Image: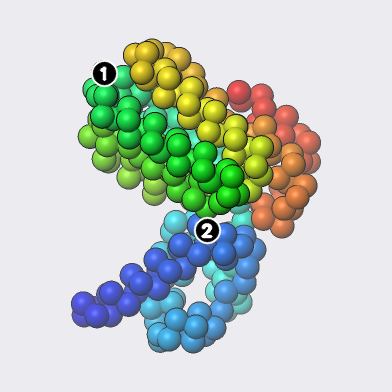
Amino acid sequence: MGKTESSVQSAVYNALRNNIMSLQLKPGTIMSTQEVAQKLEVSRTPVREAFIRLQRDGLVDIYPQKETIVSRIDFHKVDQERFVRESLECANLDLVVEKCTRKDIGELEMNIEKQQATVNACDYNSLLKLDNEFHHYMFKITGQKLAWDTIEHSSNHYARIRLITVWDKEIMMETILQHQKILSAIQEKNADFAKKSIKTHLHQLENQLQRLMQEYPDYFVKEIVSKEERYKELLGML
């Protein structure tokens, strides 16, 4: 494969992935190889290759000779992805408390100030980006790049449902308050409270689960158990 061909494949993959993760391509959207190729002005080959990579990511479902669909959010996968993230974030916080400098505290405080500005503007996408940067910065403090890369590449369902939760201004404000609690615990060198706060933060979407399922029913995998049973099951994990 030539460098140009490889670059085209990567560009198509990145464009589609970004559109899926930002929900510009909503869960359940049917995608045509021909239509995508025409829109991006490329041949169908890099589009097919991108679909295969996205299928490996769990972001599309391919039905041969039929259609390719943006995968619906699967709560079972959300649970597993959150578990990975929570485990790594809690382990990292012990090191953050140990290594965090005054400069690091200032950077995290500035990030939270920017988050507060997004609430006034109801800028959901910017809040989520700043949220990610807040968490990412803590892994920069500890030098645990592989841990953060693991979180980023194993949170495809969890990240999409997080974006839906910040469409609500009340939830946006609660997210910021939780970040402030995490930062306060780090400043006080209290790793236990920092980990307790991060767990509360990562589990907050479960408190909005029932409403999300009612407002966006087509975004989620239809399950055999009832929504109410699934809701109770997830709350029982807290």
- Tag 2: residue type? Ser
Q: Position of residue 128 (x, y in %)?
A: 50, 46
In which quadrant of the rendered view does residue 174 lie? top right
Given residues 68 and 25, the one toward you in this image is 25
How is the protein colored in the picture?
Answer: rainbow
Q: Position of residue 160 (x, y in %)?
A: 55, 50
The crowding category of the residue bearing disc 2, from other C-alpha atoms within 10 Å (few below 14, some 14 to 19, many at least 20), is some
Residue 78 left/right relative to 132: right
Given residues 235 and 107, the one toward you in this image is 107
Which residue has dot 2 on it? Answer: 22
Given residues 56 and 13, the one toward you in this image is 13
Alpha carbons under labels 2 and 1: distance apart: 35 Å
Check the picture and name the quadrant holding the C terminus: top right
Residue 70 visible, this orientation: no
38 over 58 or under it: above or below? below
Q: How many marks?
A: 2
Q: Position of residue 188 (x, y in %)?
A: 37, 13
What residue is shown at x 21% (from left), y 80% (from top)? 2
Query: Which mark, residue 98?
Result: 1
Q: Position of residue 229 (x, y in %)?
A: 76, 34
- Tag 1: residue type? Glu
Determine whether the residue tagged by mark 1 lies in a helix, strand or loop.
Answer: helix
Query: Which mark, residue 90?
Result: none
Determine whether the residue tagged by mark 2 lies in a helix, strand or loop.
Answer: loop
What residue is shown at x 58% (from left), y 43% (from top)? 119
Check the picture and name the quadrant holding the N terminus: bottom left
Residue 106 left/right relative to 37: left
Whichever of callouts 2 and 1 sits on the residue coming sooner in the sequence is 2
The crowding category of the residue bearing disc 1, from other C-alpha atoms within 10 Å (few below 14, some 14 to 19, many at least 20), is some
216 over 183 or under it: above or below? below
In which quadrant of the rendered view does residue 97 lie? top left
